[in-house]
């Protein structure tokens, strides 16, 4: 099993709050990714990074932002959460194959 | 908790039978394809991959077939077991060194005893 971690696993938060979803990997992978997945739907790439200080937007427009200050850490931030942000957020890294974290299930009320 | 795959196509098979899950991909320039298994409440798990210069690859109980002419990918699971029950996604790497994956619509596999 891959060493990629996400916290929190579940989060219920009110509209307007700022939240940060954490993602860490201990494999030393340069490439990391954030995907958004609605229930019963496919995964959509929202952010990716090819290394420290490298971040790019993915194919699905997202109001979230990311940072990559350290190789092992790739947090995702929502400055002002809205109900439309309710979804599952999956972090992944690549070293050969792509490894996924367990995901954060976010609910914005 | 809420399950992944509530609105997905579903394939129901008897335990011990073979399963075939199909996927159509979108980009003729894609050079690498992956099948993932996602169980409820978990992230996708790598099953098997195939490069565009191959048309078949076998793993343990799984085989992936690639037909580039019609942009079609299939996953065959031999002797399906209850533990195979999950949602299965195919993904294509659009190439050019990006390692960006585009995921297809998943298929929910239900295995009955």
Image: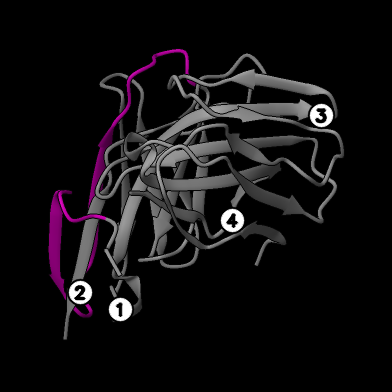
In the image, residue B27 lies in the stretch drawn in magenta: yes
Depth check: give the residue in front, B59 or A74.
A74
In the rendered view, tell whether residue B59 sits above or below residue A82.
Answer: below
Question: Would you name the residue on which mark 4 appears?
Answer: A101
**Residue A96 seen from this side:** no
Q: Which residue is drawn at 39% across and 14% down?
A: B28
Q: Is mark 2 on a helix, strand or loop?
A: strand
Q: Are tags 4 and 3 found on a single chain?
A: yes
For the residues labelled 1 and 3, the Cα–Cα distance comes to 40 Å
Q: Can you say which quadrant of the picture contains the C terminus of chain B?
A: bottom left
Q: Give the range drawn in magenta.
A: B5-30
The disc numbered 1 marks a residue on which chain?
Answer: B
Question: Would you name the residue on which mark 1 appears?
Answer: B81
Q: Where is residue A51 in the image (x, y as percent from the top left)?
A: 81, 29
In the image, residue B52 lies in the stretch drawn in magenta: no
Question: Would you name the residue on which mark 2 appears?
Answer: B111
State yes or no: discs 2 and 1 in contact (Cβ < 8 Å): yes
């Amino acid at each position: 099993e891959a060493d990629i971690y996400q916290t929190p696993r579940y989060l219920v938060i009110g509209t307007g709050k700022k939240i940060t979803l954490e993602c860490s990997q201990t494999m030393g992978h340069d490439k990391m990714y954030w995907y958004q997945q609605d229930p019963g739907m496919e995964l959509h790439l929202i952010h990716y990074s090819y290394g420290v200080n490298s971040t790019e937007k993915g194919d699905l427009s997202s109001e979230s932002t990311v940072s990559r200050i350290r190789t092992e850490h790739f947090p995702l931030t929502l400055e002002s959460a809205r109900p439309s942000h309710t979804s599952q957020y999956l972090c992944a890294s690549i070293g050969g194959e792509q490894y996924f974290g367990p995901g954060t299930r976010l609910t914005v009320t | 908790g809420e399950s992944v795959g509530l609105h997905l196509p579903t394939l129901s098979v008897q335990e011990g039978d073979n399963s075939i899950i199909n996927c159509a991909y979108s980009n003729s320039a894609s050079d690498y394809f992956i099948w993932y298994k996602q169980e409820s409440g978990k992230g996708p798990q790598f099953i098997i991959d195939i490069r565009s210069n191959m048309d078949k690859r076998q793993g343990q109980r799984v085989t992936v077939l690639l037909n580039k002419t019609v942009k079609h990918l299939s996953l065959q699971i031999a002797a399906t077991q209850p533990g195979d029950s999950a949602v299965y996604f195919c993904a294509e790497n659009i190439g050019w060194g990006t390692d960006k994956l585009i995921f297809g619509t998943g298929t929910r596999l239900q295995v009955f005893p």
